Image (cartoon, rainbow, N blue to C red):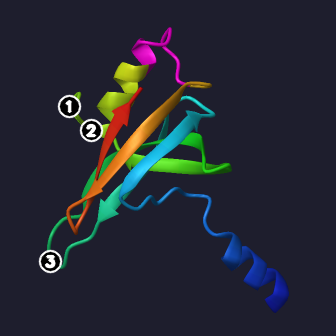
Amino acid sequence: MDYQEELKRLQKGSDYWKPKAGQFKVKALSELESADPFVRKREGQEDEISPQAKIKILVGGEEKIWTFGKGKTPASTFGQLVELATKHANQLKGVEFSVVVKNDGTKNDYTIVQ
């Protein structure tokens, strides 16, 4: 194993965007796509499978992949991004927007602001 290369890889961080609470300027680099579903395993119960979506973004000068649940309401992150796309000729690629992230201690809540 090349420990120097592994250290560089670890220091670089993930390609996935995992924001903390705050406000972020974001530029969409792709359209929404389906992502691998989130599978929640519970002892003695059937697996809970939730569909997910992803989008490639530019945030803080870095290209990242943002994944989130395919929500069922307009207020969901997915719903907000679909609504944003409809305001931009039915596309997201190249659209700049802000993401306000709030955290209640267990999960993030995202608000999309144009």
Please tell me which residue lies in front, 66 or 114. 114
Q: For marks 3 and 2, give the CA distance.
A: 26 Å
Q: Are marks 3 and 2 in contact (CB under 8 Å)?
A: no
- The residue labelled by disc 2 is 71
Residue 72's spot in the image, x, y percent? 22, 34
Earlier residue among tags 3 and 1: 3
Q: Is residue 51 magenta?
A: no
- The residue labelled by disc 1 is 73
Label 2 Cα crowd, 10 Å radius (few <14 / some 14-19 / many 20+): some
Q: Residue at x 48, y 31 (%)?
A: 97
Q: Residue at x 55, y 24 (%)?
A: 95
The quadrant in which residue 75 appears is top left
Q: Amino acid at mark 1?
A: Thr
Residue 3's spot in the image, x, y percent? 80, 91
The quadrant in which residue 80 appears is top left
**Residue found at the very far left of the displayed protein:** 44
Question: Which residues, given as a range, are shown in magenta?
Answer: 85-92
- The residue labelled by disc 3 is 44
Q: Is residue 107 above or below residue 45?
A: above
Q: Does residue 75 appear left or right of residue 66 in this picture?
A: left
Q: Are marks 2 and 1 in contact (CB under 8 Å)?
A: yes
Q: Is residue 8 above or below residue 33?
A: below
Q: Residue at x 60, y 65 (%)?
A: 14
Quadrant, the C terminus: top left
Q: Is residue 22 above or below residue 12?
A: above
